[in-house]
Image (spheres, helix red, strand yellow):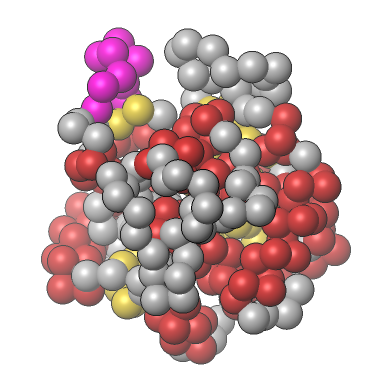
Amino acid sequence: MIVTGGASGIGIETVKALAASGADVTIAARRVDAAEAVAGDLRAATGNPGIHVRALDVADLSSVRAFVAGWDRPLHALINNAGVMALPTLDRNADGRELQFATNYLGHFALTLGLHPWLKAAQGARVVSVSSTGSLFGSVQWDDLDFRFTSYDPVLAYGQSKTACILMAVGIARKWSADRITGNALNPGAIATNLQRHTGGLRTPEHLRKTPEQGAATSVLLAASPLLEGISGRYFDHCEEAELVAERATPLQGVAPYARDPANADRLWDMATAMIGGAK
């Protein structure tokens, strides 16, 4: 299994739970030295020596390509966990893509597409994408993904990136079922991690917050539980499938119809494939 961003936040707990169950887990992380320290602690905590570290910056497509080129064995689960949130000012990656979209979705899409042969080789693989209730703040900005005309809004940009993560799961269900690859997305919940460094900290009422262990639970369920065998193209919250909602409410809950729409999934898949210059 691979966990992107597996050396911080809920990624650590995701790796820990999977490794404790006997999985061979690769932490894909931007800061290799820090990730190696985390991996050492997790090997000691789980008794599993099969925790590895490899360099990956999902916002950098050249880094994604290098990671893919170095992978050479069947892959049973890819957990697209790394992410950024609500960057206060407009920033773009080297390819000119808005950085939240590039990090949270596009780099993970390129990684998933690149690893497709190894996911297929596993003969029953799962792709798990960490989304958010932030998806309820807006659909994909189809005509202006990179905010070149629209005034940049941190929450709107975050929302589109997390909606895109759900649409990737829908796309996988539509395109890769014959390869025995499933895709699902999830909301981990409100957890106090470094993810909120641009928002002034976690603002969710305390009774609605989760611990990092609780936040990782749905990722682990989707990656490893036999209960999810054959389930694909869904969005989960609190370890259960989330319901479609007609409007955004308080507290945030459910999934918007635009994030589960097959036509949207196909449109985004084609657009993203063109962006990364890859094959469908």
Left or right: where 263 falls relative to 182: right
Front-most of 26 and 268?
A: 268
Point out residue 128 in the picture as x, y percentages from the top left corner: 56, 51
Taking the spot 34% from the left edge, 59% from the top edge, the residue there is: 91
The image shows a total of numbered marks equal to 0
Left or right: where 36 falls relative to 178: left
Point out residue 26 in the picture as x, y percentages from the top left corner: 38, 69
Point out residue 153 in the picture as x, y percentages from the top left corner: 41, 40
Task: Give the residue at the far front of this rendering.
Answer: 149
Taking the spot 73% from the left edge, 79% from the top edge, the residue there is: 279
Residue 152 versus residue 273 in the image, above or below: above
The C terminus: image quadrant: bottom right
Taking the spot 55% from the left edge, 81% from the top edge, the residue there is: 73
Taking the spot 42% from the left edge, 46% from the top edge, the residue there is: 152
Indicate the quadrant where residue 44 lies.
Answer: bottom left
Front-most of 245 and 176?
A: 245
The reply to whether residue 44 is visible in this rendering is: no
Front-most of 65 and 230?
A: 65
User: Magenta segment range?
Assistant: 202-210
Left or right: where 106 falls relative to 230: left
Left or right: where 1 falls relative to 138: left
